[in-house]
Image (cartoon, rainbow, N blue to C red):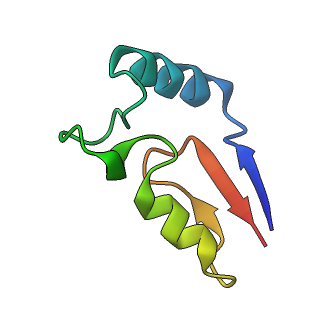
Amino acid sequence: MKITFNEDEKIVKMIREGLAKKDGYCPCRLERIDENICMCQEFRDQIADPNFEGYCHCRLYYKAK
């Protein structure tokens, strides 16, 4: 398993700026709950699946097999 940042630097910059504005909470989520702190619970659940390959919800991270 390998987790990397999105290869598109513009997306990475935009998401990181959003994270800074929201104190580490995913900028794509409305609620400020523990499950939405980056790296969000949804993506942590996805990367736990050995068959999952793809981006997190906000497209900051990518998991390769």
Most distant residue in the front direction: 34
Please tell me which residue is depicted at 42% across the width and 62% down the height of the picture. Answer: 42
Q: Residue 28, image x and y in percent? A: 32, 39
Instruction: Using residue 53 as the reference point, say whether residue 11 is left or right of it.
Output: left
Q: Residue 47, image x and y in percent? A: 61, 69
Q: Quadrant of residue 27?
A: top left
Q: Quadrant of residue 13?
A: top right
Is 48 located above or below residue 39 in the figure? below
Count of marks placed on residues: 0
Most distant residue in the bottom direction: 51
Is 54 located above or below residue 14 in the figure? below
Q: Could you tell me which quadrant the N terminus lies in?
A: bottom right
Is 46 located above or below residue 14 in the figure? below
Instruction: Using residue 19 as the reference point, say whether residue 50 is left or right of it.
Output: right
Instruction: Using residue 8 as the reference point, say whether residue 65 is left or right of it.
Output: right
Please tell me which residue is depicted at 73% across the width and 38% down the height of the picture. Answer: 7
Q: Could you tell me which quadrant the C terminus lies in?
A: bottom right
- Between 5 and 24, the one lying in front of the other is 24
Instruction: Using residue 40 as the reference point, say whether residue 28 is left or right of it.
Output: left
Q: Residue 53, image x and y in percent? A: 66, 71
Q: Residue 38, image x and y in percent? A: 48, 41
